[in-house]
Amino acid sequence: EAQVTQNPRYLITVTGKKLTVTCSQNMNHEYMSWYRQDPGLGLRQIYYSMNVEVTDKGDVPEGYKVSRKEKRNFPLILESPSPNQTSLYFCASSPGSKTQYFGPGTRLLVL
Amino acid sequence: SQQGEEDPQALSIQEGENATMNCSYKTSINNLQWYRQNSGRGLVHLILIRSNEREKHSGRLRVTLDTSKKSSSLLITASRAADTASYFCATAGAGSYQLTFGKGTKLSVIP
């Protein structure tokens, strides 16, 4: 089944404890992206990647890192999480058509 | 940067009625897309309309695009309780895979 998977789906952590949210797609898409969704603010793009080893900042990159060592994987790294990074995170991938396929989301709570 | 703005923010209708949601944007676009999100879950692509198209249909969905007014509308005909969800418009600029999302319209269809 063609899909985007994210892990974990739910995470509670404490301020400053490094964490990684994984994202994987099995559709051979070149483009991948991370978004965060907050009430009243909609979806905002954190980082995106046009291809392997090519990443770029979105609208809200502060406090996040990404890497794209393989086409299928695009992990999101929070080196030192803070409470303002409590949010619902979505990974998405896209072929050339620009239609994006979203993962199920990761709900993060930073205490 | 947030470009699409949906209107209304929330809409409540009876099953069988039509639902219309509007989206306005600020800059020139290559295409405009509509996505649906069931509560807390990943977004699902509904329909894409290119900047040189004025109207597009998909099942019970009808999308219009007016580039002179920088606006789009999504019409869902003969709504069902299962259509209850949030609906987002997203715009893509020329030559860009990046999507900029609006804040969404929350649709409630009452059985």
Image (cartoon, coloured by chain):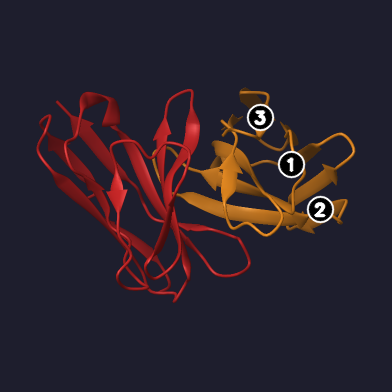
Chain colours: A red, B orange
User: Contact, CB < 8 Å: mark 1 with mark 3?
Assistant: no
Q: If you read the primary sequence from the N terminus, does the residue marked by circle 2 or circle 1 appear first?
A: 2
Q: Position of residue B44 (x, y in %)?
A: 53, 53
Q: CA distance from mark 3 to mark 2?
A: 17 Å
Residue at the disc numbered 2:
B51
Relative placement, left or right, of A17 versus B109 is left
Label 3 crowd (10 A; few <14 / some 14-19 / many >=20): many
Q: Secondary structure at mark 3?
A: strand
User: Contact, CB < 8 Å: mark 3 with mark 2?
Assistant: no
Q: Which residue type does callout 3 highlight?
A: Glu
Relative placement, left or right, of A110 versus B81 is left
Relative placement, left or right, of B64 versus B30 is right
Q: Position of residue B4 (x, y in %)?
A: 66, 35
Q: Chain of mark 3?
A: B
User: Contact, CB < 8 Å: mark 2 with mark 1?
Assistant: no
Residue located at (23% from left, 49% from top):
A77
Identify which residue, A108 or B62, lies in the foreground: A108
Identify which residue, B34 or A76, lies in the foreground: A76
Residue located at (18% from left, 30% from top):
A110
Q: Which residue type does callout 2 highlight?
A: Ser
Q: Secondary structure at mark 2?
A: loop
Q: Chain of mark 2?
A: B
Residue at the disc numbered 1:
B74
Q: Secondary structure at mark 1?
A: strand
Q: Which residue type does callout 1 highlight?
A: Leu
